Image: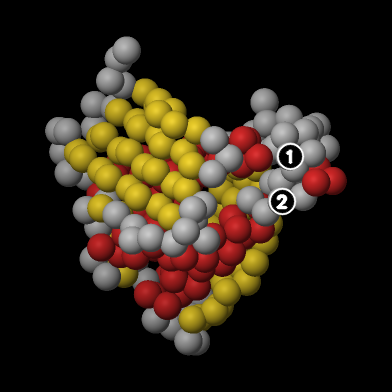
Amino acid sequence: MSEFGIRIMKTNEKEVEVKRGTRESRIETRIDSGERREFKINSGMQFLNHMIETIAWRACMNIDLKTETTNYELKHVIAEDSGIVLGKAFAEILANRIPVGVNGSGCASAIIDEAKAFAAVSFEGRANCFVERNCDGSKITEVDGMYACDLVAFLEGFAQGGKLSARMDLEKGRDPHHTWESGFRALGEALKSALSPNSWRKNTTAGVKGTLE
């Protein structure tokens, strides 16, 4: 098997392991819904690690992530590719829960200090991502050593990998750290809702077409 492409190493309704290799990066992740444990998150960017940890904490999912660059240590590539792999893993968890029924969509608002954000996700087999950046904190180009545009790239990769529709509205905030963290808190809460059981939707999806294909 080629080392390039995305591979599902383990998949069930509680635990998924995904690896992806390209000429630019090697990314692997494991997510599970077992008892809370220490996360092993190493993207090479401290703020991205913190945002992925925030997703885990709010979604109530354990997340491990390991990245390796091959030719160039490009932060944009790491952010986007990490998003793709993590999105794929969440989609696998959700797909495995469809036979017993799962919400498949969710939305939430979250706050931290002065900042407030809204996020929504819907797993319907289509990749769409929109990030609204209207408050002062969201317009600052860099946050804790990471470009804000690369945080958007992570979210776009997440939607691409998960074949999901995602929206994040950074509504209030002056401090860029607080602003983005409120958004990722909301994203984690939305994912928690999307992964929650819903027997009414047994063997179908959140979209009326009923399939992720």
Residue 72, relative to residue 193: is it above or below? above
Q: Position of residue 195 (x, y in %)?
A: 63, 51
Image point (33%, 38%), residue name: 28
Considering every residue shown, the one lying at the far top of the view is 1
Considering every residue shown, the one lying at the far front of the view is 35
Q: Are marks 2 and 1 in contact (CB under 8 Å)?
A: yes
Circle 2 crowding by C-alpha within 10 Å: few under 14, some 14–19, many from 20: some
Q: Which residue is mark 1?
A: 100
Considering every residue shown, the one lying at the far left of the view is 71
Q: Position of residue 82 (x, y in %)?
A: 36, 44
Image point (31%, 69%), residue name: 143
Q: Which residue is mark 2?
A: 197
Q: Is residue 115 left or right of residue 29?
A: right
| Quadrant of residue 187 within the rendered picture | bottom right
CA separation, marks 2 and 1?
8 Å
| Quadrant of residue 203 within the rendered picture | top right
Considering every residue shown, the one lying at the far bottom of the view is 114
Q: Split into 4 quadrants, where in the image is the C terminus?
A: top right
Q: Secondary structure at mark 1?
A: loop
Q: Nearer the viewer, residue 101 or 189?
A: 101
Residue 139, relative to residue 87: is it above or below? below
Image point (73%, 39%), residue name: 100
Q: Position of residue 5 (x, y in %)?
A: 37, 23
The numbered mark, 2 or 1, whose residue comes first in the sequence reads 1
Asked if residue 152 can be seen in this view, the reply is no
Residue 125, relative to residue 1: is it above or below? below
Q: Amino acid at mark 2?
A: Pro
Q: Is residue 164 left or right of residue 138?
A: right
Q: Amino acid at mark 1?
A: Val
Circle 1 crowding by C-alpha within 10 Å: few under 14, some 14–19, many from 20: some
Q: Is residue 52 left or right of residue 187?
A: left
